[in-house]
Amino acid sequence: MSKAEQGDWVQIYQVILPAGQRAPQVPVETAGVPLEMWVKGFLVEKQAEVGTDVTIRSLAGRLLQGKLVTIKPDYEVNYGSPQPELLTIGVELRAILEGNGNVE
Amino acid sequence: MSNNSYQAVIARKPEIIRKATGIDYAVFESGGISFDYERMMSQAAYNLDKIREIQQQTGVGNTPLLELKNMTALARQVAGPGKGARIFIKDEACNPSGSFKARRASVSVYHAKQHGYKGVVAATSGNFGAGIASQAAMRGLKSIIVQEVFDSHGIGQPEILEKARACEAYGAEVLQLTVGPELFYTFLLVLEQTGYFNASLYSPFSIAGIETLGSEIAEQVLASTGRKPDVIIATHAGGGNVTGTSRGLQRAGCESTQIVAASVDLKGLHMASDIDFNRKSFTTGHTGFGMPFATSPDRADVPRNAARPLRYMDRYVTVTQGEVFYVTEMLATLEGLERGPAGNTSLTAAFALAQQMGRDEIIVVQETEYTGAGKHPSPQLTFAKKNGIEVRRGNPIENVPGKAIIIPEHPGQINIKDINLDRVRQSYLRNALGSVNNGALSPQDIEFLAAETKLEVAIVEKKVSEIQANL
C-alpha cells in the first residue's frame, strides 16, 4: 500500500539542516550528513502517495508538513534474540547463593 | 516572517527561553562568575511541602523502599570477612511513567498549567519524555518531546525508540531527530512557534521535584532500620539526580550521608558523532554526559543549570556496560525485579561498594526504572552485536567502550573505578575561569566556586591563582 487516506496514521520526514550547514562544533562525520527529522500524525489531505509532500495533524494537534515516508508505521522495538551470555546468569548466581557455586 | 536560519534562531535564544520558562535568570546574576543559586532555587521553584502536595495530586512519589536481601547475601559471600553493607533500593519504577523522572516532570507541568501555558515541550531522549507526557496528560496540557534517536542511516537506538513509543502512548507529539547538538535549534523553534512552556530537565522546578526522593529515603530508612543511611548512590548523567536527591537528604537531616555518583564508562565515544552514536548500548547514565555536566553545568537549555552535581558528590565511580547488564539479570533473577538496565548503573556500583562497607552499614540505591521492549539487556545486546560490537563472558576489565561488552563470569568480578574528583574539580574551575586571565576574583566569586566544588575557600583561592598564572 503506497497510498494513504485522510485520517491515516502516517510518518513524515524533513531535512532540518542540510549536510555542510551543520553547527560548527559537530565532528566531521556528523557535519557531512544532514540533520533529519521524522514525526507521526494523521494525514490531512484526502489522499496522498508515499514520497509526496503532505500535511499531518500531530498528537499535540499541530499541523506539520513533510514528505510522506510511511503509512501506519510499526513500532520496531522488541525483546531481541535470546542472549546466551545472559541466559545462565540467574542459575549461576542462585547456585553461588545456595552454596553450590564456585566462590573464589 | 521571522528568519529561521540556524544562526538567527540561536541568536533569539535568550528571549525564547525567557518566555518559555517565565524565569528572568538575569536577576540571580552577580555580574561576575557567580550567581545566587540558593535564591534561584527558593524563588523560582516551590517549597518541599508544596512539592509533596503537587506530586500527591498526580500520584508521583511515595514509592517503596525495598531491601535487596539476596543481593546483600551474595555480596557478603564474595566480600572479605565482616564486609557487606545492607543494600536497599528505592523502587522509582512505581511512579506513573515508570521512573523518577515523573518527579521532575510533575512540578514543571503543574507550574506551566498554573501560569496559563497550553502545553509543554521537553528536549530529551530519556525517561523524562514519558514523565512529561504522562504528567501533561493528567493535567490536560499538550506535550511535545524532541528526541535524538537515529544515526544518518535511520537506525534508531532501541532504548530511545521505546521511549518515543511511551511518549506517544501518553499522547505526546514526538519529533525524532538524527544525531547532533542542533536538536536544540529545533527545540527553540518549537517553543517559539507554540508558545508552550520549556519543561527543561535543568530548571529549578525539575531539580526541586527530586528533593522529595531524598527526603523520602531518609524517612523510610529511619522507619525500617532505626538509623540514617550511610551511603546513597545515584546514577549520574546530567547531574539532576545527584543534586535533587542530595538536597532532599540534607533537608531531612542526613548531612553526613555520603553521596556517591555512578556512571557507565563510555570514555572515547563522542556524543555528537554519527558513527559512535550506535556503538554504545547505554544512551544515558554514562560518562559522556556525566563528565561534561559535572565540569561545566551551564551547558543546558536554560541559562543557569539548577543541577550542580559537584556541589554534592563525595565520590564519583564508573562501571562498565557489561557489568550493568549482569547486575540487571541479578536483580531480576535473585530479587524478582525486572528493571532498568540504564537505571541499574548505580545498583551495579552499589553491589561492589557494599563489599567495601561494614555489615552494619546501609547503602541505598536511589532509583529503579521500568523495563520495556528495546529497553532491556536482551534487545540492547542484540543491537550491539548487529553493530559489530563484541559481546562475551569474561573479566570486565577487558571492556572497551564501542568495541567490546564483557559480561562478568562471576559476581566477584564486578568492580568500581574511582574518578579522581580533584581532577574533575580542577577542570570545573578551569572552565569557570575561562581562557582569559581577568585578574583577582571578588570574594563573592571565590565563595561561589568553593560551594560549586565543595572545597574550602582557601583551597579555591590557591587553585584559582595557579590556573590564572598559567593563562
Image (cartoon, coloured by chain):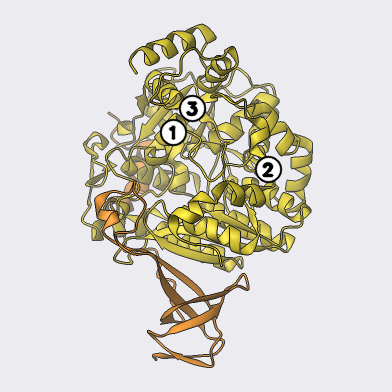
* Chain under numbered label 1: B
Disc 1 to disc 2, C-alpha distance: 31 Å
Q: Position of residue B199 (x, y in %)?
A: 62, 51
**Residue A6, quarter of picture:** bottom right
Q: How many marks?
A: 3
Instruction: Say what secondary structure mark 3 lies in.
Output: strand
Mark 1 residue type? Ala
The reply to whether residue B88 is visible in this rendering is no
Q: Which mark is residue B23?
A: 2
Q: Which numbered disc flags the more N-terminal residue, 2 or 3?
A: 2
Q: Which numbered disc flags the more N-terminal residue, 1 or 2?
A: 2
Instruction: Say what secondary structure mark 2 lies in.
Output: loop
Q: Position of residue B294 (x, y in %)?
A: 46, 31
Q: Nearer the viewer, residue B298 or B274?
A: B298
Residue at 45 percent across and 60 percent down: it is B5
Mark 3 residue type? Val
Q: CB under 8 Å between callouts 1 and 3?
A: yes
Dots 1 and 3 on the same chain = yes
The N terminus of chain A lies in quadrant: bottom left
Disc 1 to disc 3, C-alpha distance: 7 Å
Q: Position of residue B421 (x, y in %)?
A: 41, 21
Disc 2 to disc 3, C-alpha distance: 31 Å
The reply to whether residue B34 is visible in this rendering is yes
Q: In this figure, which residue is indicated by the disc labeled 1?
A: B262
**Which chain: orange?**
A
Q: In this figure, which residue is indicated by the disc labeled 3?
A: B260
* Chain under numbered label 3: B
**B247 relative to B283, above or below:** above
Mark 2 residue type? Ile
